[in-house]
Image (cartoon, rainbow, N blue to C red):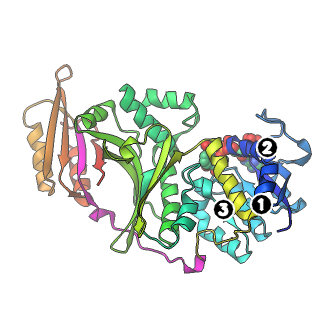
């Protein structure tokens, strides 16, 4: 790469718009740090007329991003549109084939097409960088690829979605319900105003888990979803009971190797209040890695928003400008093996199950009998009557229980006329 580096930014929304300003502001600094002079030669968004937070240079604006790589000589392209398919994939594919380095915060694209795209990048000897796709400003991917390169990592877990962590923290603090707290999160810009579903149902965190697994275990990206549950069913009652048990509710993303199989999962967990992860609150993200010989490493920081995301995008830029042209996933894609998925049925841990039932004689014994029939043993039982409605909440904390048994038991109990709605299931984090 010569000393004059041509840059294109595709997508000028929250992330791309902020990045544009950052690049303009940091030109001298970048020159000082890398000896390279960057020139933004093209920017692209859908709508030229849209009101933006910055002055848009119309002379370099393209409404069709594919024209950017056809007409301009680009060295590095930032893809900041989003989504796994469509124009984002097309632009990245085409740019890599034209030997243009790509930097993207797009976890949906990387978690779905990362293997395919990294092969194209490797063939064309350019970089495909995606530090900003996981954990916002936390330099977690570079830490795995470089700082912990020779470690054998056995487990990576953490709080990977700031929206969910904010909602859960706020529900615990205010005792308010999910809908109201979600509305507040949307007002504050912590949750998407239109459709926050992909954050709330665990999809966003799962995409990040997939990327973490591929890097931590030097494997191909997995293409199955074994266990993905969101936070939509958690109620204020669950926080009250968790509090009594000295526990807190967190949405965790977890990836680990069990008996040479890959087990990736995202679900709400009950964590002990006195643990590190139990004290990561609000929009914060945190990732914990267990490896040898390093032991346990913790990284925490702001997980989303244009500022931390831009920080990660800039670090990718620095890496490329310093000539650190490496394999996107740390080692050649051809050497990254596929790994079989762990059988979810065998997953075993302690469960919190809350049943809402009619408060009448015999109901509790119907539940406990069903649990016993399905090899589920009770560690603790809490019964909270609601005299006004003649209903009761029955909370059961189980001993270690196999997924196959709890699935069957809950399926049966949901059919019981005395069980008023789908039981809430949370997993105790071990
Ligand atoms: N927002 C965050 O905090 C955050 C954090 C981490 C990662 N990310 C990732 O960053 C990426 C961008 O997110 P964002 O929040 O910045 O999204 P956004 O605000 O919705 O911005 C998307 C941008 O893409 C442009 N665009 C859409 N279709 C286009 C097309 N066909 N051709 C050219 N431009 C097109 C839009 O143009 P108009 O402006 O004209 O509509 C807009 O500028 C996503 O992959 C997201 O997952 C975001």
Q: Whole-Å distance between the Cαs marked 1 and 2?
A: 16 Å
Place of residue 111 in the rendered image (x, y in percent of width and height, measured from the top left): 56, 61
Tell me whether circle 3 and circle 2 mark residues in contact (CB < 8 Å): no
Q: Image quarter for residue 157?
A: bottom left
Q: Nearer the viewer, mark 3 or mark 2?
A: 2
20 with respect to 313 (left or right): right
Q: From which residue to which does the magenta span run?
A: 332-355
Q: Which mark is residue 129?
A: 3
Q: Toward the viewer: 115 or 63?
A: 115
Residue 194 visible at all: yes
Residue holding disc 1: 34
Residue holding disc 2: 25
Magenta stretch containing residue 349, yes or no? yes
Q: Residue at x 75, y 60 (%)?
A: 91
Magenta stretch containing residue 268, yes or no? no
Say above or below: 337 vs 100: below
Say above or below: 58 vs 176: below
Q: Disc 3 or 1, which lies upstream in sequence?
A: 1
Q: Which residue appears farthest toward the front when viewing the image? A: 32
Q: Disc 3 or 2, which lies upstream in sequence?
A: 2
Element carrying mark 1: helix
Say above or below: 87 vs 341: above
Q: Which residue appears farthest toward the bottom when viewing the image? A: 335
Q: Quadrant of the C terminus?
A: bottom left
Q: Which mark is residue 391?
A: none
Q: Residue at x 71, y 59 (%)?
A: 318
Element carrying mark 3: strand
Q: Disc 1 or 2, which lies upstream in sequence?
A: 2
314 with respect to 143 (left or right): right
Q: Which residue appears farthest toward the right when viewing the image? A: 59
Say above or below: 388 vs 138: above
């Amino acid at each position: 790469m010569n000393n004059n580096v041509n840059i294109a930014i595709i997508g000028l929304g929250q992330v791309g718009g902020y990045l544009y300003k950052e690049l303009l502001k940091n030109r001298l600094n970048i020159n000082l740090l890398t000896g390279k002079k960057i020139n933004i030669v093209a920017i692209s968004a859908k709508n030229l007329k849209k009101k933006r937070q910055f002055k848009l240079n119309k002379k370099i604006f393209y409404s069709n991003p594919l024209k950017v790589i056809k007409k301009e000589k680009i060295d590095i392209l930032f893809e900041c549109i989003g989504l796994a398919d469509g124009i984002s994939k097309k632009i990245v594919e085409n740019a890599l084939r034209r030997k243009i380095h790509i930097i993207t915060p797009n976890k949906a694209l990387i978690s779905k097409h990362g293997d395919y795209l990294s092969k194209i990048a490797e063939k064309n000897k350019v970089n495909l960088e995606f530090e900003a796709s996981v954990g916002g400003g936390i330099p977690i991917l570079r830490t795995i690829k470089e700082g912990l390169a020779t470690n054998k990592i056995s487990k990576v877990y953490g709080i990977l979605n700031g929206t969910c962590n904010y909602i859960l923290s706020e529900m615990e603090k205010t005792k308010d319900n999910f809908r109201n707290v979600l509305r507040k999160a949307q007002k504050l810009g912590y949750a998407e105003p239109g459709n926050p579903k992909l954050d709330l149902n665990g999809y966003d965190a799962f995409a990040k888990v997939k990327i973490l697994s591929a890097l931590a275990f030097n494997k191909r990206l997995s293409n199955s979803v074994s266990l993905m549950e969101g936070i939509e069913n958690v109620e204020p009652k669950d926080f009250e009971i968790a509090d009594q048990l000295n526990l807190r509710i967190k949405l965790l993303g977890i990836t680990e190797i069990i008996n040479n199989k890959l087990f990736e999962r995202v679900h709400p967990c009950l964590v002990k209040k006195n643990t590190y992860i139990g004290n990561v609150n609000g929009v914060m993200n945190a990732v914990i890695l267990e490896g040898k010989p390093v032991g346990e490493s913790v990284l925490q920081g702001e997980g989303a928003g244009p500022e931390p995301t831009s920080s990660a995008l800039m670090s990718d830029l620095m890496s490329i400008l310093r000539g650190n042209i490496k394999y996107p996933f740390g080692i050649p894609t051809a050497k990254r093996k596929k790994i079989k998925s762990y059988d979810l049925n065998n997953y075993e841990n302690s469960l919190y199950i809350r049943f809402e039932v009619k408060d009448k004689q015999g109901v509790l014994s119907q539940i406990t009998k069903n649990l016993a029939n399905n090899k589920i043993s009770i560690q603790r039982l809490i019964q909270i009557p609601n005299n006004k409605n003649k209903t009761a909440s029955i909370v059961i904390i189980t001993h270690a229980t196999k997924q196959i048994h709890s699935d069957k038991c809950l399926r049966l109990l949901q059919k019981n006329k005395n069980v008023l709605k789908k039981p809430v299931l949370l997993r105790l984090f071990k």
